[in-house]
Image (cartoon, coloured by chain):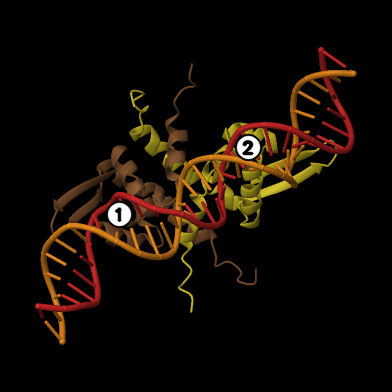
Chain colours: A yellow, B brown, C red, D orange
DNA sequence: GGTAAGCGCTTTGCCCGGTAAAGCGAAAGG
DNA sequence: CCTTTCGCTTTACCGGGCAAAGCGCTTACC
C-alpha cells in the first residue's frame, strides 16, 4: 500500500523543478507567447520550457491558447489556480529583498 | 559589464534547487541532526543533502552547530533569516491544500 | 565479549534531465 | 532577396543528483 498523498510535498516537488517558479513569476505580469516568455524568464532552453509548460497545463496552473497556426501565435496565461501562486511569489520577493545581497564577487 | 544583480531572481534560483524547500520546511519544525533531517525530508541522498546544507549555511539561512565530535552530534537549525522563509512555505502549503488533489493513478 | 545499530557524513560510479545548437515552414519587414 | 520572428522539435552532450558502500567511533543489547 502506497503512503498517503501529501499535497504539500507534491507542491514542493513541483515548485522545485527547474524554471517553474521563474515561469510563474513571468506569467504573473500577464499572458505571453512562447519566445516572449522565454526571454522574460531568461536563460531557459526551449525544450525545457516547453516541457514545463506542458506539465503546468496538465496540472491546471497554466492555460495555453493557440490563436493562429500560421503565422504561429500562442498565448500562455495563468489559470485562476495559477494566479493564486502570486502569494507564493510575493512572499519570495519580500524575503529576497530583505535578505539577499549581491554575492561577494571576490569569490 | 554584468547585468544588475536581482535578489528575486537569485531567490528563485535558490529555492528551485532540488530539495532546498523540503529542507527548509523540515527545519521549520525545529533543529535536527543530519540523519534525522534526511528522514524528515524523505528520499534525499546524503551527498546532495550535505551540499545543500553547505550552501544554505553560506547564505546565512541555516546554522550548523557541532555539539560533539565523538559520538558525532550535529544540529542544523534555521537562522532568523531562515525562519522568515516560513511565510513562503506557508503560502505554498495554503496553495497546495486548495489546489492539489491526488493525481489520477490511471495515468 | 561480540555484534548490531546509530551517528555524520564522504566516496564512487552511474544515469537521466536540463543544455546548447541547429532547424523548420510560413509571414513580415528591410 | 535576406533576415527576423513565430512556436516549437530534434540531436547530441554533459553535469548534477542518484543509489550504494564505507568509515571511525559510541551506545545498547544479549
Could you say whether the residue bearing mark 1 is in a helix, strand or loop? helix
Say whether residue A21 is left or right of residue A56. Answer: left
> What separation in Å lies between label 1 and label 2 (alpha carbons)?
35 Å
Residue C11 location, x and y as percent? Answer: 34, 50
Q: Locate residue A31: give its quadrant.
A: top right
Q: Foreground mark, 1 or 2?
A: 1
Label total for image = 2
Count residues near mark 1 (Cα–Cα under 10 Å), then give few for <14, some for 14-19, many for 20+.
Answer: many
Residue A67 marker: none
Residue B27 marker: 1
- Image point (57%, 33%), residue name: A43
- Image point (45%, 73%), residue name: A3
Q: In the rendered image of this protein, does residue A87 appear above or below residue B27?
A: above
Q: Is residue B68 visible?
A: yes
Residue A34 location, x and y as percent? Answer: 69, 38
Could you say whether the residue bearing mark 2 is in a helix, strand or loop? loop
Say whether residue D14 is left or right of residue B18. Answer: right
Chain ID of residue with mark 2: A
Residue A30 marker: 2
Chain ID of residue with mark 1: B
Which residue is more in the foreground, C21 or A34?
C21
Q: Are marks 1 and 2 on the same chain?
A: no
Q: Is residue B31 visible?
A: no
Residue B24 location, x and y as percent? Answer: 35, 51
Count residues near mark 2 (Cα–Cα under 10 Å), then give few for <14, some for 14-19, many for 20+.
Answer: few
Which residue is more in the foreground, B34 or C26?
B34
Amino acid at each position: 500500500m502506497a503512503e498517503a498523498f501529501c499535497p504539500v510535498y507534491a507542491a514542493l516537488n513541483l515548485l522545485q523543478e527547474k524554471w517553474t517558479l521563474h515561469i510563474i513569476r513571468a506569467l504573473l505580469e500577464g499572458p505571453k507567447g512562447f519566445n516572449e516568455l522565454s526571454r522574460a524568464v531568461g536563460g531557459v532552453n526551449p525544450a525545457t520550457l516547453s516541457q514545463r509548460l506542458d506539465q503546468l497545463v496538465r496540472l491546471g496552473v497554466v492555460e495555453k491558447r493557440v490563436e493562429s497556426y500560421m503565422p504561429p501565435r500562442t498565448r500562455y496565461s495563468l489559470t485562476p489556480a495559477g494566479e493564486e501562486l502570486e502569494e507564493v511569489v510575493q512572499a519570495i520577493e519580500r524575503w529576497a529583498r530583505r535578505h539577499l545581497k549581491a554575492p561577494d564577487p571576490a569569490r
